Amino acid sequence: MLVEPTKKRSRIREKNEEVILKAAEIIFAQRGFGAATTHEIAQAAKMPKANLHYYFNTKEALYVHVLENILETWLSAAHDFDENHDPASALENYIRTKIELSRTNPYASKIFAKEIISGAPYLETHLRKVINPWINAKAKIINDWIEQGKMAQVDARHLFFLIWSMTQTYADFSIQMSIVLDKNKLDKTDYETAANLIIKMVFAVCGLK
Amino acid sequence: MLVEPTKKRSRIREKNEEVILKAAEIIFAQRGFGAATTHEIAQAAKMPKANLHYYFNTKEALYVHVLENILETWLSAAHDFDENHDPASALENYIRTKIELSRTNPYASKIFAKEIISGAPYLETHLRKVINPWINAKAKIINDWIEQGKMAQVDARHLFFLIWSMTQTYADFSIQMSIVLDKNKLDKTDYETAANLIIKMVFAVCGLK
DNA sequence: GTCTATACTGGGATAGAC
DNA sequence: GTCTATCCCAGTATAGAC
């Protein structure tokens, strides 16, 4: 009688990998890939450094896992920007979702930002394969809306560049903002003020509402 | 008869420090402080690593010099945003200057961005001392304009957060943009499109023009 | 699966000849 | 002022006991 092979990854592996990924996210956000140390990540995960290498062979493999998780969150956030909505509700939903992501998921945004600023060494392939088709589809939707007279003429790609920058800056540059606003941490009101202001600007330039 | 003391820094020191600072800017922008290596900076400056340490004792000292240069450029760019202008020309000038800085000075923007995203470990003091007073003065000018009925009610600080993000994203995220726009490098037209779109959005939300 | 000890490498910094 | 050789530590990764 054969021993049952482990068909699924063990419970304990599942759990530990999650702890490591969560710790890694924080350290990679603070330091970037190159400056992060496995020692510091291990400390944050409250386990010896050797265990990191047991679950993720190399620092690079760990980083790539973290990046992939981020992209997943990213893309699932963009689900209801489609041609079944009107421009106003599609854009408002999208902006509010992105701001909410910046509030609840600042580390992901920071890692992504550093990766792009560095020249996207680990992400360029993904960008070309995944994000490019995504934005092309969205740009087509916007251009259709423009043709149908539902919104004003606007460069769809540059509009997305600006929406991305305005929403993500509330994660990436939050330290600068708390210094300027003289508070320890941005609160929910700040994110609402931001969302409303961004929506107002985008609506105005799109001739909406 | 005494030997004339070297009253000014030698010509050759002047020259070499400049070469090193220029090389360091590029490498720090790509890698961030922690991941940059003095070896790589020395290569970019076409001199042996030891010479770096001769001119700048430590990597940290070199980084701080680079940061200080950036802040200087930054602040001098904001000179003509004052109460002697009308809101429209002040804002338009400021946005065009910032976009032009992103185009001509992308490394500075990237180093600054990574420093802030990392939690501003080397810049927090400067931010509190220099940039905070700056934005408070500008916010006061804007609030005066609002009181005088020259522009619509708007949160001045958040308006600056958004202008900074929209203009600097054309330096920091230019790699992502060239992928999306399917070109090797952004050209002058892209920066003009950006400036015009940003100005349009800002004017709309401020009730200008 | 966990952990200590350690091998090995790369990088910051310096000594000292030129 | 320049440069080679080198010191030394920090960091990735692994061996091997438990």
Image (cartoon, coloured by chain):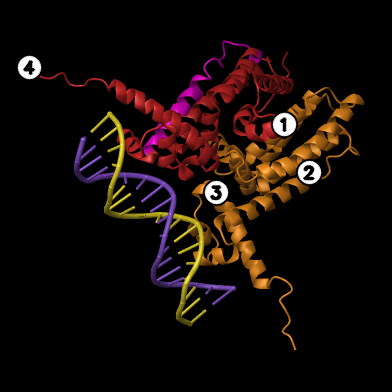
Chain colours: A red, B orange, C yellow, D purple
To the question of a shared chain for discs 1 and 3, the answer is no
User: Which of these two is toward me, A201 or A23?
Assistant: A23
Q: Position of residue A138 (x, y in %)?
A: 56, 22
Q: Position of residue A39 (x, y in %)?
A: 41, 41
Q: Is residue B57 shown to the viewer in this render? A: yes
Q: Amino acid at mark 2?
A: Ala
Task: In the rendered structure, find residue B33 and report the number of the disc placed on it.
Answer: 3
Q: Disc 1 to disc 4, how far (Cα)?
A: 69 Å
Which residue is found at the position 41% from the left and 30% from the top?
Answer: A21
The chain ID associated with circle 4 is A
Q: Amino acid at mark 3?
A: Phe
How would you rate the neighbour count of disc 4 (Cα within 10 Å): few for under 14, some for 14-19, many for 20 or more? few
Return the disc, 1 or 4, that comes first in the chain's sequence: 4
Q: Disc 4 to disc 3, how far (Cα)?
A: 59 Å
Please name which of the two marks, 1 or 4, marks the residue nearer to the observer.
1
Task: In the rendered structure, find residue A182 and report the number of the disc placed on it.
Answer: 1
Question: Magenta residues?
Answer: A61-88
How would you rate the neighbour count of disc 3 (Cα within 10 Å): few for under 14, some for 14-19, many for 20 or more? many
Which residue is found at the position 60% from the left and 65% from the top?
Answer: B55
Task: In the rendered structure, find residue A1 and report the number of the disc placed on it.
Answer: 4
Q: Position of residue A69 (x, y in %)?
A: 44, 27
Q: Amino acid at mark 1?
A: Asp
Residue pointed to by mark 2 = B78
Q: Position of residue B57 (x, y in %)?
A: 57, 62
How would you rate the neighbour count of disc 1 (Cα within 10 Å): few for under 14, some for 14-19, many for 20 or more? few
SS assignment at label 3: helix
The chain ID associated with circle 2 is B
To the question of a shared chain for discs 2 and 4, the answer is no
The chain ID associated with circle 3 is B
Q: Could you tell me which quadrant the N terminus of chain B lies in?
A: bottom right
Q: Quadrant of residue A89?
A: top right
Residue farthest to the bottom?
B1
